[in-house]
Image (spheres, grey):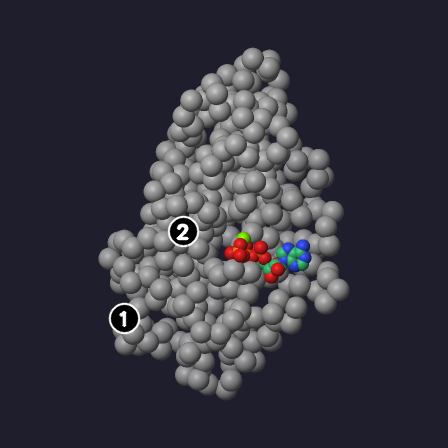
Amino acid sequence: MTTNSNIILEVKNLNVEFTTDDGVVHAVNNVSYTVERGKTLAIVGESGSGKSVSSLAIMGLLTGTNSNVTGEVFFNGKELIGADPEEVRKLRGDEMAMIFQDPLSALHPYYTIGDQLIEAVLVHNKISDEAARERAIEMLIKVGIPSVDQRIDEYPHQLSGGMRQRIMIAMALINGPELLIADEPTTALDVTVQAQILDLLRELQKEFGTAIVLITHDLGVVADLADEVLVMYGGSAVEHAGVRELFYEPQMPYTWGLLASLPQISVKKEQLDPIPGSPPSLLNLPNGCVFEPRCAFKNQVANNACIESFPELLEVSQNHEARCHLSEPQRLAIRIDRKIGKINK
Ligand SMILES: Nc1ncnc2c1ncn2[C@@H]1O[C@H](COP(=O)(O)OP(=O)(O)OP(=O)(O)O)[C@@H](O)[C@H]1O
Ligand SMILES: [Mg+2]
């Protein structure tokens, strides 16, 4: 049991492996974090770093595949990894919900959006069909769907990408969840619609007090919405900090690379892959630091430490942890030299 009642989600040493013909894919390695009620944790990191897989594991959506999930996930103090899948299914779509990276995959093509929303309400609530329809209509209005009376009877393919994304949000929030995991909720959308969807998430968070885990490639979005940030690389958490600490005093060379892609925090929609080289094979992770093969600063560390051992995630200051063998004075000197951090928010 978690003791701090302010914490809605506590992830402890989460590991996810997939058994494949090529070997074991170590997709998520010892990831731990907590999320407070009503707060937003952003998870950033390049493609394949384990952002979606870790979230699917938390939601209990990796069962019955080639996956092996270990570790602990406490939701409202209740452990989910070892729990009866049926119990976790009951929580999903009710007390916790997810917006998926691909909205089409999450909406059923053969049912109208109204039917799907009504079903989502009825599965978790003992109310009449009429009351459920009322709630669906209310929610569609909240997420800004125009001509709701007509739209409610349409099928997903009849809607634009932005509209489908709004339907996903309506679906995820219709039962007032305490936790929402939003996986790249705006990536597929154009900039204006992105901004509208993010505003909407913010408003709904305020209204429902929902905690959000926001997976995004976009550091502008992080600066706008997040309270805390978890940086993932090669399936591991490499830095974890308050949003201010992360932008002002980033500690890990991978994070420096991410921030270097962002000349000014006010510039939105920067994609994060500015670092030369490619991510590690998850079939065969390095023994040392997962970022070592691409790190421009490894030669400053004595005794080949970066090749020999993976640094622990250590506290740098209050509300800030990072994995790096560079000493704090070394990191500070590099940051000053390269003008990393201290970006005006
Ligand atoms: N069922 C599976 N079997 C084998 N490997 C898988 C499976 N599902 C995911 N993976 C691998 O796990 C790793 C992490 O994937 P994940 O989808 O979490 O990445 P991500 O950080 O969400 O990336 P993106 O930013 O592209 O969405 C990837 O290398 C992916 O290929
Ligand atoms: Mg993903």
State whether residue 259 is above or below residue 113.
Answer: below
Decide if residue 29 is on the left or right side of residue 204.
right
Label 1 near ligand 1 (CB < 8 Å): no
State whether residue 150 is above or below residue 246.
Answer: above
Ligand 1 found in image quarter: bottom right
Note whether residue 137 is visible: no
State whether residue 49 is above or below residue 327.
Answer: above
> In which quadrant of the rendered view does residue 337 lie?
bottom left
Dot 2 or dot 1: first in sequence order is 2
In the rendered image, residue 173, in percent from the top left (x then y), is placed at 50, 31
How many marks on residues?
2
Disc 1 target residue: 339
Residue 228, which numbered label? 2
Q: Marks 2 and 1: which is nearer the front?
A: 1
Observer-nearest residue: 1 or 287?
287
State whether residue 235 is above or below residue 93.
Answer: below
Residue located 51% across and 64% down the image? 233
Amino acid beneath label 2:
Glu
| Label 2–label 1 contact, CB within 8 A | no
Observer-nearest residue: 294 or 211?
294
